[in-house]
Structure formats: C-alpha cells, structure tokens
Amino acid sequence: MPLPVPVLSEGVDPAWLPPAAFRAVGGRRTLIRGSGPLAETVHGEVAQACRRFGGRVVRDAQPGEAAFDLVLDLGAAGLGDEGFTCAREDGTTTVTASGGKGLLYGLFHVVRLGAAAFTGAWARETHRPALALRMLDHWDNVAVHPVMGQVERGYSGGSLFWKDGRARGDLERVRAYGRLLAACGVNAVAVNNVNVHETEAHLLTDRIGEVAAIADLLRPYGVRTHLSVSFAAPVVLGGLPTADPLDEAVRGWWATATRRVYEAIPDFGGYVVKADSEGQPGPFAYGRTHADGANMLATVVEPYGGTVHWRAFVYDHRQDWRDRTTDRARAAYDHFVPLDGEFAPNAVLQVKHGPMDFQVREPVSPLIGAMPRTRLAVEVQVTQEYTGQQRHVCWLGPMWSEVLRFRHDPESSVGERARGGLVGVSNAGDDPFWTGHPLAQANLYTFGRLAWRPDAEPREVLDEWIGLTFPETSERLSEGLHAVLDGSWRTYEKYTAPLGVGWMVQPGHHYGPSVDGYEYSPWGTYHFADRDGIGVDRSVASGTGYAGQYAKPWAGLYESPDTCPDELLLFFHHVPYGHPLKSGKTVIQHIYDTHFEGVAEVEEAREVWARLAGLVAPARHARVAERYEEQLRSAREWRDQINSYFFRKSGVPDERGRRIY
C-alpha cells in the first residue's frame, strides 16, 4: 500500500508543497519500479497527485504495458543511498536511484522542474548531495523555559514536537514537516535544545519512547532523528558521582543508555553536545579535553553507525569589559586547533560560520580552515535571532553562499571543507505559516538546497522556492518577490550595526537597537566607540591578534585598515570617524547614509508588497503586510538611535544636512 501523504490541519500553509506544485506529475502516467519503505512514500506522493489531477500510477508494469511519461526506477547501482539520475528520451522522463532516499529526492527534483520535466529531450544528469549530513537543530524545550519559552530563539510559535512538558498529540504535522524537509534535501533533525535542561535530559532514558514516536514520523521521508544530550547525564540521570569521560563507570553508563536508544530507534543519528559553554557542563570540570569528551561518546555510538556533533561554541562569557586583551572571537580557534587530529572519525566538530554569534556580518571563522584532520560541520542560524526575528524580511541565501564559497586557501572552499555537514538552527514552529513570517520560509528552503549543493547560485534557489510555493505565479508576482527578497539581507545590514561591528541589540531578547546594551557586560561583545573612533582592534600588531589566526593572504588583508574590506573594517580595527573607506566615504558618513538608505529600502519593499495584493492568498498577504509595518517601525528606530548616538559621540554633522536627533 502506498504511504498516504500527511494531511495538514485547516489553515496551515502548505509552504513549498501546495497541491498545484504536483500538477505536472499528477496529470501523467507514471511507473514506479522497486520496493521498500521510501518507495512506498514515493508511491503515495504520486498516487495522491494522480487522484487530484487525473493521471495514473503503476507499480512494476507487465510486458506490453503502454508507454509511460515518467519512470521512477529503484534499480540503479553506484549512486549511493541518496544519489539519482534523471534523463528524458523518446517521450519518457526517467529517474533512477540505488536507494530509497535517492528515489524520493529524484521525485522532488521532477516536481521542482514542473512541466519542463516533460518537455523535449535531455541527456542523463547525475545528482548527488555534496554533503552527506544536512541537519536542522531545533532549540526546542520540552518544558517551557521561564526565560526562553518553548523554543529558545524561536519566532514561529511553539514547538512542532513538544507542548506542555510532553510530546505533542498532533504529531501528524511532524510528518508533514519531514516531507517539506525532504523536498529541499534536509536529511537529519535534532529535536531538542542544545541547552539541555533537566526535563530534556530525560529524553535520553525514560522518555526515549517520545523521541521514537517522532522518529517514526520523520523516517518515511528519509530524515534521521538526533538528540541533544547533557554531558552531565551520568550524574543527573544515573546517580553517578562523576561525568569524567575517562571514568569506566561513566563509559559503561553511556554505553548502556546508548544501546537502549538504538533499541528504540534503530536508525538514530546520534548526539549533539554543547559542553563547557555558557554554563553547560563539560570535560573541563575533570581536567579533560574536548576531544576526550567527544571521543567517549563517539565510541558508544560507533557500533550503531552514529555520530557525535560536538559544538565548538566555547568562550569566556564572564569577561571583564575593561580588558581589551581578551577577545571572544579568538576563543574557538584557541580551544580547538591544538586538538586537530585527536577527534574520532565519527566525532564531528560543529563550528559556527563566524567567530562570534550569527551576526548580520562576520568574517568566516578561521577555525574552519585550520583543522584539516578533523571532521567539521558548519553551523548557520536559519532562525533570525540577530537578523529581524522573522518580523523583518531578511533572506539569508546570499550570506550563506558567501560563507560556503569562501576559501581559507586555494585548495578548498568552506562548503568543501564541511565534511561533517551543514547544520542550521531551525526557524520552524507550530505557526500556521511554519516560520512566523511567510517569506522566512525562503530561508528554510534555501538552507536545504545549499546544504545539498553549496556552490548553487542562491538566486536560482530562490526561483525554485517561488516556483514551488506559488506554482501558478505570474511574472509580476515573481518579480515582486525578487524585489523584496533579493537585497533584503543587505538592507537589514544597512539600518542595523555598521561595517561588521555587530551587536548593538537589546540585551536578552536581542530585538531592536541598544548601542551600549552589551558594551559593559561580561559577554565579550563590544564596539569600543568613544569620541575619537569606533571598532575592535583585532590586529596582530596592536590588538588581540585575532587577524593572525587566518592563513595568508587573509591574515595580511585583515591586518591593516587600509586593506581590510569595508564591510568588516570595524570588526578588525578601531578607526577614527573620519577614516576614509574604499567607497570614498568616511566611516561616520557611511553610518549616516546607510541608515537612511536602509529605511528607504524598507519603505519601497513595503509598497512593492502592497501592490501584490490579489496575487497572493489573502491570509498570507495580510501577515506579510503586518510584518512590514513592524519592520518599518523598527528600521526607523534603528536609524534614529544609531545615527543620533554617533552624531553625539563624534560631533560630526551629516554632510547632507538630514535630521539627526
């Protein structure tokens, strides 16, 4: 029997899989060859489309059967579990795969192509994911946290998985989520917060059945389930006096707990660990290294094919703001580079794409280029903690593409170095539009497609999302969506923190401007603005030495304010307000101009969206229009606070004579 397609509750947006996206497939004759659980998923998808659009689907046709428009064949060799080929010859489009996941991804490839999949003739193409692991981490709490709520840094309603301290009752939507993820290439999900509180710790042991129920719903779409665990679990759950990773009793406890996890979830992906970071327990308490901690866990999951994702987000969050020699940006490199080559093959070091914390502009982390003997996963933040919190339009595809194409040396790009995969902090929740802001769905889709192919052109990926989400779109709607999304990341950058300095947000919740909000805090997030200048000196010659963590030529480029790229100038250097940029403007005039420009661009985008009424479903259009009102209010607030702060600090007037408060 074909697996039925998950049914969404009334009012839940279908995102990039509305029924009309399957019209080209559903109106034709399709043959499916092969068997297995994911072949049944493929059969269910095609059968549902055929029922809606009048086509026909056949399993394993007999000799003499009439020709088919589409053949989905699970009989190829040499393509791995996820690869597939696609070709069109003599009026038939053929997808071949070696594994069930490949067949499923091949079907969704045909859905993306739409009518073009059945036009003309074209030679066989082979498609394989560049990265074997393409994972979303959900920072979801089982129990509502008194500060962070149900989802830490979540801006899309509640958790898809948890509610009122237990697994949700309406888990059918989890299967629909897995379907969305498969359609853009995501193959793994961690279902709970990396900050593991006591309630969440129990998911590893006496509550593993709840995790297994989620895994059962994601499995038909090729999505493996991972779990964030507390390093202190042997103490918190096992009653042991220690969590020392070299202690035999501790190792035995983890081995037993892990065996029971795999008994409940045979295809369990592995553990995600945040240790010795922001108060989370770790091996430092026992005089051990991060490699000691990661390898102990890697050993217990290795017999089952599991992986340990060990996060490299380790730094001193109790800094003295008076001490300019301490630099949070240096921390990950300083902690982990000495350990290169010491991590087990199935231990993946998960590294944030920048050295700080997902700011709107950061340099690419030097750690990614400095550990050639360690499997690294690159982590990005799909949820918009520092980029508008899904109240602002901020399509992050261009940012991620810049990161993934960056080359620390000529040998390989970041996308090629990420042998451990690409990981994103998810922006999905139980909101009717999945992502709070309907246009933030583009970030979730783009993440999956760039994880599959890091060198993809982000604008082409956005075209895919538009074509799927609005399958009968007009050219006017497509142009309008590009107009509001294409430059939205740079627009957001213009009206917020300038030239790579970062932060300047309200403490705690991180929404809205507060130039000095973190300036005298222990978190290590400073801009050092005074009457003479602004920025952090991270040079080797006179600063923290962070620039020296890069290989040539980047170390030399970043070392001098004369060669440092403008967009990162204040990240690497403290300069006078009159310092000339390569654009010809001074730093202070750049601050004024970009903040006025950013607001003007939001005003223009709001008008573009208003003119699209009638081309978009009313509820979706209304939600975006409402969010644009808030984005414009916030952008004006950012403009006025940033410009006024630096006018008062510098005493330099705007050369264009605009009003600055």
Image (cartoon, rainbow, N blue to C red):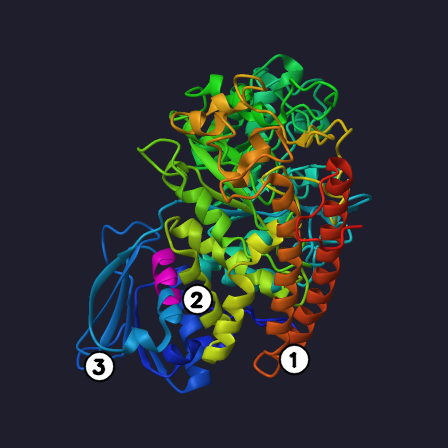
Badge 2 or badge 3: first in the primary sequence: 3
Identity of the amino acid at label 3?
Ala
Q: Amino acid at mark 1?
A: Pro
Is there any visible trace of residue 508 in the rendered image? no
User: Can you tell which of label 3 and label 1 is closer to the viewer?
Assistant: 1
Q: Position of residue 609 (x, y in %)?
A: 61, 73
- Give the residue number, with chain letter if any, for mark 2: 463
Q: Secondary structure at mark 3?
A: loop
The numbered dot on residue 489 is none
- Binning the other alpha carbons within 10 Å of mark 1 as few (below 14), some (14 to 19) or many (20 upward) gives few
Which mark is first along the chain, 2 or 1? 2
Question: Looking at the image, which residue is at 73% across and 57% down?
Answer: 636
Q: Residues within 10 Å of mark 2 (few under 14, many from 20)?
A: some
Look at mark 3 in the image and give the residue it sits on: 67
Q: Which residues are magenta?
A: 100-108
- Residue 163 position, x and y percent, is 74, 55
Q: Nearer the viewer, residue 377 or 173?
A: 377
Mark nearer the N terminus (3 vs 1)? 3
The structure residue drawn at horizontal position 56% and vertical position 39%, both measured from the top left corner, is: 261
